[in-house]
């Protein structure tokens, strides 16, 4: 064994890693703050972010863990949903993604990437705030994929607002419609198609339990998400359907540069976490795979966190 591996340098993270290519320091693996100030109109595009987020385009490697599975992912064009979509496809699943129509550039890139790798990739744009669209979305995904056994309800609206006095009823309503009503409509429409072994995964947040002041409206929707994961897990266990959640901390995605965070917060995004940086979408991809895979079969009603050491699920 190389003496450096057990010496003080290795213990404190700056050691010699040349003998283990997969061994990388999580503090310095990805860009660290300060980040460039930047803002885009909602809902933003990953391709216009600087630095661009890492969704695993060049790094995620699959090993057949989801061979033949059929997945619908909302917000699959960018950020965490896109990382899940890439990972699912590389694990052998066919994937349908929903996104807001103005996100076509991000969605188009992803669809081309997945198709080039020989998996089915279906683009289903539309506004999740509309109940009829949610029903159509599930029906189109089922028709296009030839069934459905993974539903990832990941899309969300987050618009920071310093004071409740400045929060309009329209914004409050849009946040509730996107983050609470849409999962309800989608799950209800999907359920008749889900067989034993199927999974539902909701993206929640560390905000569910540790809300920040400017996210009063958003944070309570994430508490609702964590809560529905737990109730539905109990309700659907007798049907053999598992329901779990993922609670990210600060992740470098379009949501944050299109109104989700103040410029001040964005520039120091993730700095307060023990790892000292924002996470990248690809760092959560494996969790979405694990929660969908057959070998994760005893996990239901769970919230898996990934927040750089801050917060708690
Ligand atoms: P993102 O902007 O890449 O994804 C959010 C997606 O939501 C958008 O791409 C968009 O397609 C979709 N969306 C929003 N409103 C919609 C509507 N009305 N109709 C259709 N689609 C709509 O950002 P992200 O950070 O990857 O967000 C994914 C999930 O992660 C969200 O649930 C978010 O709350 C959660 N999350 C993010 C962070 C973070 O720091 N980025 C932290 C905790 C939780
Ligand atoms: Mg997007």
Image (spheres, rainbow, N blue to C red):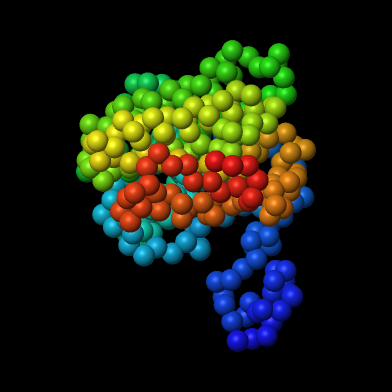
Can residue 285 be seen at all in this image of the molecule?
yes
At a point 33% along the width and 56% down the height, the residue shown is 295
Among the 4 quarters of the image, the one containing residue 2? bottom right
At a point 39% along the width and 30% down the height, the residue shown is 231
Q: Give the x, y percent position of residue 26.
A: 64, 61
Task: Report whether 242 appears left or right of 287.
Answer: left
Q: Give the x, y percent position of residue 90.
A: 38, 59
Residue 239, placed above or below residue 165: below
Q: Give the x, y percent position of residue 214.
A: 69, 27
| Residue in front for this viewpoint, 74 or 40 | 74
Residue 60, placed above or below residue 305: below
Q: Give the x, y percent position of residue 63.
A: 36, 65
Q: Quadrant of the C terminus?
A: top right
Can residue 79 be seen at all in this image of the molecule?
no
Q: Quadrant of the N terminus?
A: bottom right
At a point 65% along the width and 38% down the height, the residue shown is 257
Among the 4 quarters of the image, the one containing residue 9? bottom right
At a point 57% along the width and 15% down the height, the residue shown is 170
| Residue in front for this viewpoint, 89 or 43 | 89
Task: Report whether 159 appears left or right of 225.
Answer: right
Residue 146, placed above or below residue 210: below
Among the 4 quarters of the image, the one containing residue 126? top left
């Amino acid at each position: 064994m190389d003496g450096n591996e057990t010496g003080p340098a290795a213990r404190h993270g700056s050691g010699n890693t040349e003998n283990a290519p997969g061994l990388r320091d999580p503090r310095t693996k990805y860009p660290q703050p300060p980040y460039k100030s930047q803002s885009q109109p909602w809902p933003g595009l990953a391709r216009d972010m600087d630095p661009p987020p890492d969704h695993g385009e060049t790094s995620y490697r699959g090993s057949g863990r989801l061979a033949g599975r059929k997945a619908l992912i909302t917000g699959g064009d960018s950020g965490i949903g896109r990382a899940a979509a890439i990972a699912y496809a590389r694990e052998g699943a066919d994937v349908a993604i929903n996104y807001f129509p103005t996100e076509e550039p991000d969605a188009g890139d992803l669809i081309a990437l997945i198709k080039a790798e020989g998996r089915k990739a279906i683009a289903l744009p539309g506004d999740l705030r509309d109940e009829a669209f949610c029903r159509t979305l599930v029906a189109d995904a089922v028709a296009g994929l030839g069934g459905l056994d993974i539903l990832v309800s990941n899309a969300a609206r987050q618009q920071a607002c310093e004071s409740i006095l400045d929060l309009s009823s329209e914004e409050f309503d849009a946040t509730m419609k996107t983050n609470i009503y849409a999962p309800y409509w989608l799950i209800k429409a999907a359920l008749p198609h889900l067989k034993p072994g199927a999974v539902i995964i909701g993206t929640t947040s560390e905000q569910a339990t540790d809300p920040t002041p400017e996210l009063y409206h958003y944070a309570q929707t994430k508490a609702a998400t964590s809560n529905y994961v737990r109730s539905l897990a109990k309700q659907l266990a007798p049907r053999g359907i598992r329901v779990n959640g993922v609670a990210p901390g600060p992740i470098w995605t379009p949501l944050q540069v299109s109104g989700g965070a103040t410029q001040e917060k964005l520039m120091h995004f993730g700095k307060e976490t023990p790892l000292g940086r924002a996470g990248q979408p690809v760092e959560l991809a494996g969790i979405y795979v694990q929660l969908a895979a057959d070998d994760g079969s005893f996990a239901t009603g769970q919230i898996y966190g990934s927040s750089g050491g801050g917060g708690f699920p």
